[in-house]
Amino acid sequence: MLGNMIVKPPLTLRPDQTIRDLLLLWQTHPVGVVGIVDENDCLIGVIGSGLALGDGISLTMDTTLNEVMDDDFVSMSPDVYQEEAWTSTSDVIAISNDEGKLQGITTKCELAVSLYPCAKFISRELDAVLNAASTGIVSINKNGIITTFNPAAEKITRRSREEAMGKFLADVVIPTGLLEILDTGEPKFGERLPVKYSIGTRMYVSNRSPIIENDKVVGAVGIFQDISEIEFISNELETVKELNKELKALIESSYDGILIAQCDGVITQVNDAYTRMTGLKSKDIIDRPFRKLVEDGHYASSIVDSVLKKKKSVTNLQISPLGNRLMITGNPVVNERGEIIRIVINVRDMTELENLRQELQDSKKLNRRYQEELCNRNGQKAKEQRVTTSSPQMQSVIDLCTRVAKVDSTVLLTGDSGVGKEVLAKHIHNKSARNAGPFIKINCGAIPETLLESELFGYERGAFTGAGKDGKPGMFEMAHNGTLLLDEIGDLPLSLQVKLLRVLQDKEIIRVGGTENRSVDVRILAATNRNLSDMVQQGSFREDLFFRLNVVPIQIPPLRERRCDIIPLLNIFKDKYYKKYGIRKQFSPEVLKIFYEYHWPGNIRELENIVERMVVTAPEAVITAKHMPENLRYVVKDVSSRVMVQGVMPLREAMLELESQLINEAINLCGSTYKAAKVLCIDQSTVTRKLQRIKQFKDSRRDKPANFSASK
């Protein structure tokens, strides 16, 4: 500090004293600077060698000091450090106390003499630090010239200090951004810098900072630290951490209980499976010796002591605190010197294994019984669902179904409602190689759209409110290795058609609420009474799904087009309900004729329902026309009547006349256009439209004048 430089009181004079007084003072006290003070001993000016003495003033011995003194000085406290005083812009520094009284006077020359030993020591100290530093340090001035280049920098750059000092940075080494600091003045920390050598690549971390003086960048310094070993250790540490995680995961995933104990028997690790088997919590086991568990009565003997004594694996059977039979195996872990450092104890619950073995045997027995019952039921159902026909047209359909049954191609069964699409689907399944597998049917039009997806594909646990706690397999999973019939496929919503197409293509399904793909091996059969081609044109059915389903299309003719099957089917249904109800009935020839003539809009399903109704409700043993439903009696009131042609007339008029007679006769018999339309197998709107057209035609004929020709 400046106070340390005050060794004697300063020499001072008053401003009214003269040059003579100054010279006399210098003769007795040869000092560099004399202070001019006022009556309060406060410095107001200075006079000294090297200072101008009143430029332009004619000096005499009587010239007062007030005329020649210089006020270019700086006052500083004694507590100011010499380094700070050195930055002063004035060459003279007055050392004053807090009251402003002069304590001493110094100059920059005296400061330089005082600071030189300190600067010299600091320089030697800085050189020692730089030379001892293991990090490379390089500094440059504002022109990019290297001013510092320590031994560590020599080692990193493979350049000697003599080759670097005083040279432009880019001429010695790759700048690596140090020159940029001169332009930006912004420090850069923690940048990784790989350097390739002939023996390999070393990794360095670089910190670069500007050197600031008077708010200006006058240089830059870069520090380079070799972190290759640190990188290697860090990578090794990460590897060890990952191995520890994997080891812990393996221990926890084991179904058997696992304990790890030190050579002194203190338990260091235990998994959840052990807690499940024994009921002992990990917090009550870890950091306790195994023999303490023996003393507490949890085990009959210490497996750790047995392993340490025999120096090999030991296995024994004991009873757990929960009463389970446990097989405990202790395995020693030795180091490279053959010393036991760990004991790994494996605990297996033999009670669970025995229970699982018994459950497996019971499941196998139950499975065999189910398979036998399923085979019996399949044989019985195959016999019950035997397809019978006398129609050549229907026989060709059955033959086609039998042929396609031998392959797994998708089949699309089309036809009116009740023609026997499901029976033919079961026929295809029974004749296929999948006949031992399940035959699953789902009606796409009978299940609400919100539930149809979960019924088809199943759902996972918690997929939606009300879902079963264990989830549920869908129809595709239930039909695995078998056949799935998608009945009324035309009613499948568009949102599910996309998912169905993906299942048909990939043979995989995803349960509702799940993410796992499940492979399914299913033969797909589809059935509908709608025209899918028209639906594709209307945009209500996907074209790509239609092509995927329409691999083998099979059109089933309605019953009215194969009337030769009516009587054989009637007899089959009669025998069926005789076996079911024990009621034996016969049908009169009149009834058989009516059945043969009836158009059967409901096809085979309607025929079966009517046969069951007549068998159950007819009081006599022989069923006659009076026992028949009302709609059949109306339509075939006179089965022998036929349309008679009594003369030649235009065909259009004849067709209109025939429609008029049929519609009027049906209305007279039934009493309404609705019932008439039902027995005529047309819509009520069609009946109304035809009556209106017939009336317009007759009115036009009545209003048209007669046309007589003179010659023919």
Image (spheres, helix red, strand yellow):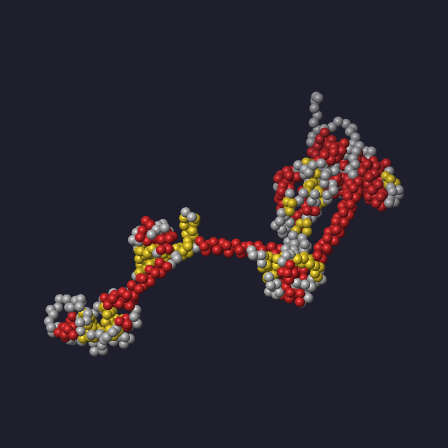
Which one is in front, 659 or 460?
A: 460
Which residue lies at the image location 25% right of the left edge and 76% below the top edge? 101
Which one is in front, 354 or 530?
A: 354
Which residue lies at the image location 74% right of the left edge and 41% below the top edge? 435
Q: Quadrant of residue 522?
A: top right
User: Residue 346's spot in the image, x, y percent?
Assistant: 65, 57
**In the figure, is residue 150 to the left or right of 580?**
left
Which residue lies at the image location 75% right of the left edge and 52% below the top edge? 362
**In the figure, is residue 16 to the left or right of 205?**
left
Q: Residue furthest bottom?
A: 39
Q: Is residue 464 among the parts visible in the rendering?
A: no
- Quadrant of the drawing holding the N terminus: bottom left
User: Residue 206's spot in the image, x, y percent?
Assistant: 40, 55
- Quadrant of the drawing holding the C terminus: top right
Q: Quadrant of residue 623?
A: top right
User: Residue 176's spot in the image, x, y percent?
Assistant: 37, 51
**In the figure, is residue 609 to the left or right of 59?**
right
Which one is in front, 360 or 429?
A: 360
Q: Is residue 43 among the parts visible in the rendering?
A: yes
From the viewer's perspective, is residue 302 above or below residue 7? above
Q: Quadrant of residue 250?
A: bottom right
From the viewer's perspective, is residue 480 above or below residue 465? above
Q: Residue furthest top?
A: 711
Which one is in front, 558 or 189?
A: 189
Which residue lies at the image location 81% right of the left edge and 33% below the top edge? 641
**Total label count?**
0
From the viewer's perspective, is residue 429 above or below residue 269? above
**In the figure, is residue 696 to the left or right of 224?**
right
User: Residue 526's spot in the image, x, y percent?
Assistant: 69, 41
